[in-house]
Structure formats: structure tokens, C-alpha cells
Amino acid sequence: MHAMVLPGRGERLVPLERPDPIPGPGEVRVKVSGCGVCRTDLHVVDGELPDIPYPIIPGHEAVGRVDALGDGVTDLTIGMRVGVPWLGFTCGECFYCRAAKENLCDRPQFTGYTRDGGFASHLVADARYCFPLGEDGDDAALAPLLCAGLIGWRSLVMAGEARTIGIYGFGAAGHIVSQVARAQGRTIYAFTRRGDTEAQQLALSLGATWAGASEDLAPTELDAAIIYAPIGPLVPQALRAVRKGGRVVCAGIHMSDIPTFPYHILWGERQVLSVANLTRKDGADFFKAIANVKIQTHTTAFPLSQANEALAHLREGKLVGAAVLLP
């Protein structure tokens, strides 16, 4: 197999040839046809997440075909197209797993972070945590759904019954969840970096009512705000934008420090919530919800060998939509 491997903290990915991995009991090997590039991959590459077991292969938005089965796998078959998401394993025994909150598991494994991921021609995944994708749709277009879509869905659910929603950071997740929200009859206000006219135009083309800079206020109060950009100062900015009783949902795994802010912008029963990982039920609910919604994923394709370049484009804000690596 060919893989782009992270040797250590803050280093560039390096191309390596390895023997094809062999799936163990309950696992499958997937021949990868496309893997999305997520901001969480940046957090892994930049060493912003703890306890990374170097060397590691990043990537957790993988789409491909099952090409080998481990012992005991009965739900997946050779040749089936599947998606491999961020959540790669949970213990099933801790308090959170037993309370149907496996996204908070005490002993989880994460694809592309604590177990090798999809920046490769092949990966091994726990069969229980793979999503069958059927045959509709292009592999590269489906890849961002495996994290940007799933985390977008969980953050939208956590926004509750909000009808007017502000999205801060209109990238991979924002451009997907806005389409789901619009299909549900909600109104979207998109917030981007100042001067990012491409992202603002994308938002408007996907049905957003308004698009502007993150430092600006929308022309109306918001019921909820979802923050995808990993920028702590956006939290008080979003609190100022939501009405009393509104929610600010922080959807990233990592964020810069949130600055102090006056209590009065939180008062009025406003809430600040965080999204942590996802559950398999989130996946089932999400794919059911979008079955009749024609989600347009805007992607830029890079060959697998240019993974460093794709990550640099994401870091520098040069991407509109999502990047996808093609082995």
C-alpha cells in the first residue's frame, strides 16, 4: 500500500510504501478511492491534539470498497462501498457507551488520529463503524460527508428548533449543513473571513439569506449560531448575535482560547455548547435525512501525493468547500 505518513509533531507528511494491512477479527480492509481533508487533520498534523501515536496516517473522511474481511464480519461484503468516519471504535462498556453516548466514550479510537486513516491506498477499519454508502453519487463528492457532513448534522441537531441560524466559517461543514438546514425550512446567515467573497458567493448560491464578515452582525437576531472556524474570539461575537434563549454551538475538536467577555451577552438564558465526535446513530440519521436532498459538495481534488499541498491550502484559507485526496 501507498500512504502519506506523519512521522512526528509538526512535520510534513512523507510518502511511504508499506505491506497491505491485514484486517483482524471484526475488521475490514478498505481500498480507498477518495479521502476528504478536514480541519481536524490540520490539528493532527500541527500537533494540537494530545497523545498522537506517531507515526500515524491521517484522514477520516474515507470512501472506498471493502477488499478483505476479518473473521466474524457478516454485515459487510467484498466490493461494498463504505465510508470510514472519525469515530473508529468505542469500548461499549464505559458509562457513556452504556448511556447511548458513545461519542463521549472513555476509551475510543479515532480514524486518522489514534489509528491509521485514509491518506492511503488502503486502510483497516472496525466493520461496526463503517457506513454502507450504496452506489449513488461520486466517491470524491461523498467523502466530505463522512465528517464535515456528520459533524455538521450533529451541530444542527444541537441547535435545536432554531429557525434562523448563523454559520461561522463557511467551509466544508458549513456548506453541507446549510443545504440540510435550508431543506428543513430554516434561514441561514453565513459568516466568513472578511473579504472572502468566494465563500460568501458560495453561501448565497446555496440559499443563504445573507453573507458577510464574521465581525459583522446579521440584519436580524439569530436563534442559534454554529461555529466551525477554530477561532475562540468568535464565541463572544456569536453570543452578541443570538437572541435571548439562543444557542451558540462550537463544532470543532480544537479551538483557540475564548477571550473573557461581559456576562450580559450570555445572560438571558443564552447557551454555549460543544460538539464532541459523533455516534453511529448520527450517521444513520444523517444519511436518512439527506436521502431526498440533493447535497452539492464543492470539492477540489488533489492526488494523494499532494496531501501536504492540500493541507496548506486549507490552513491558508484558499479552499472553497472541501479538498479531497485521490489515491
Image (cartoon, grey):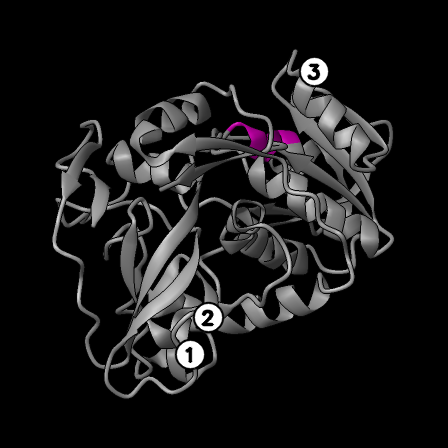
Magenta residues (range): 233-237
Q: Nearer the viewer, residue 86 or 23?
A: 23
Give residue 76's mark.
1
Q: Nearer the viewer, residue 214 or 245?
A: 214
Horizontal and vertical percent for residue 232? 48, 32
Callout 1, which amino acid?
A: Leu
Horizontal and vertical percent for residue 76? 42, 79
Callout 3, which amino acid?
A: Thr
Toward the top, the furthest residue is 195
Dot in front, 1 or 3: 1
Callout 2, which amino acid?
A: Met
Q: Is residue 245 visible?
A: no
Q: Are marks 1 and 2 in contact (CB under 8 Å)?
A: yes
Q: Please give the residue where the numbered disc 3 appears in the rendered image.
A: 197
- Label 3 element class: helix
Sequence order check, earlier mark of 1 and 3: 1
Q: Please give the residue where the numbered disc 2 appears in the rendered image.
A: 80
User: In the image, what residue occupies the spot 50% across and 55% down?
Assistant: 146
- Alpha carbon distance from label 1 to label 2: 7 Å
In which image quadrant can residue 107 be found? bottom left
Sequence order check, earlier mark of 2 and 3: 2
